[in-house]
Amino acid sequence: MAAESTQIAMTEFTNSNIEVMYTAEQIRERIAELGRELTADYAGKDLVLVGILKGSVIFLADLMRHIDLKIGIDFMAVSSYKDGTTSSGDVVILKDLTNSIRDKHVLIVEDIVDTGLTLTSLEKMLGSRGAASIKIATLLDKPEPRINKELKVHYTGFVIPNEFVVGYGLDSAGRYRNLPFIGIVKDKDAA
Ligand code: 5GP
């Protein structure tokens, strides 16, 4: 009983199997900077943020509150065929946009760019819909495994090493999306 009361309870957010890479505060500050940059860059333009489900939802929700402009939001869900650990680059639309992007300035909002194949496909698909411009914002950029080296990522929160990260929208088998920070799972087999 006494021992129990002096122990720090381990919860999902204080899980010792997760090593913090960026704290909630660091993320908040960086997103505020990105928001200021976007506010300046898109002033006077008809901007729509296109969030890629599900990983981008927290980033998009925070980012949009730092863009002091009249904006719209929409979402897409895609699935990429992966052969083991390598992605073929083929993307299938699971949920398409609700509204037309004709003549709009589109900012695709992603959680993380890895090989870049998902965004390459997405850019191609959206490219034929008559948007005024299409750019990419990602919270995290992992340049090392990039396959499409030509892919231009216009706005990046943090450039990270080649590690599998979770939290702040990013999952591991559906878990950890609700962590308020970004971290690395130390032991993937531990619960
Ligand atoms: P890409 O086509 O750039 O290889 O794939 C990007 C997608 O792969 C991301 O939207 C994300 O769903 C997933 N992904 C890539 N790296 C990571 C990572 O480190 N952690 C998590 N949770 N997902 C990742």
Image: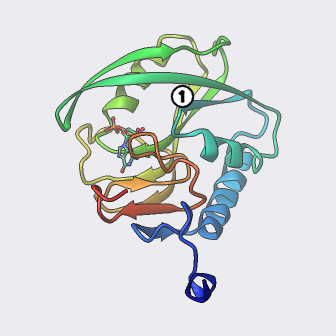
Up the image or down, 181 lies above or below 98; here it is below
Local SS, label 1? strand
- Quarter occupied by residue 69: top right
Left or right: 101 with respect to 46?
left
Look at 61% across and 39% down and name the residue there: 57
Look at 31% across and 52% down and name the residue there: 143
- Quarter occupied by residue 122: top left
Task: Locate the C terminus and report the quarter of the image it occupies.
Answer: bottom left
Left or right: 134 with respect to 174?
right
Return the x and y of residue 106 as percentages of the image width and height.
61, 28
Q: Quadrant of ligand 1?
A: top left
**Within-10-Å neighbours for mark 1: few <14, some 14–19, many 20+:** some
Up the image or down, 104 lies above or below 28; here it is above
Up the image or down, 42 lies above or below 163; here it is above
Return the x and y of residue 6 as percentages of the image width and height.
60, 88
Q: What residue sits right under mark 1 in the picture?
A: 134
Return the x and y of residue 28 as percentages of the image width and height.
67, 62
Q: Nearer the viewer, residue 1 or 39?
A: 1
- Quarter occupied by residue 31: bottom right
Three-letter code, disc 1:
Ile
Up the image or down, 60 lies above or below 134; here it is below
Look at 26% across and 42% down and name the residue there: 149
Left or right: 110 with respect to 31?
left
Look at 65% across and 13% down and name the residue there: 98
Return the x and y of residue 133 as percentages of the image width and height.
57, 26
Colouring: rainbow
Task: Locate the N terminus and report the quarter of the image it occupies.
Answer: bottom right
Cβ of disc 1 within 8 Å of ligand 1?
no
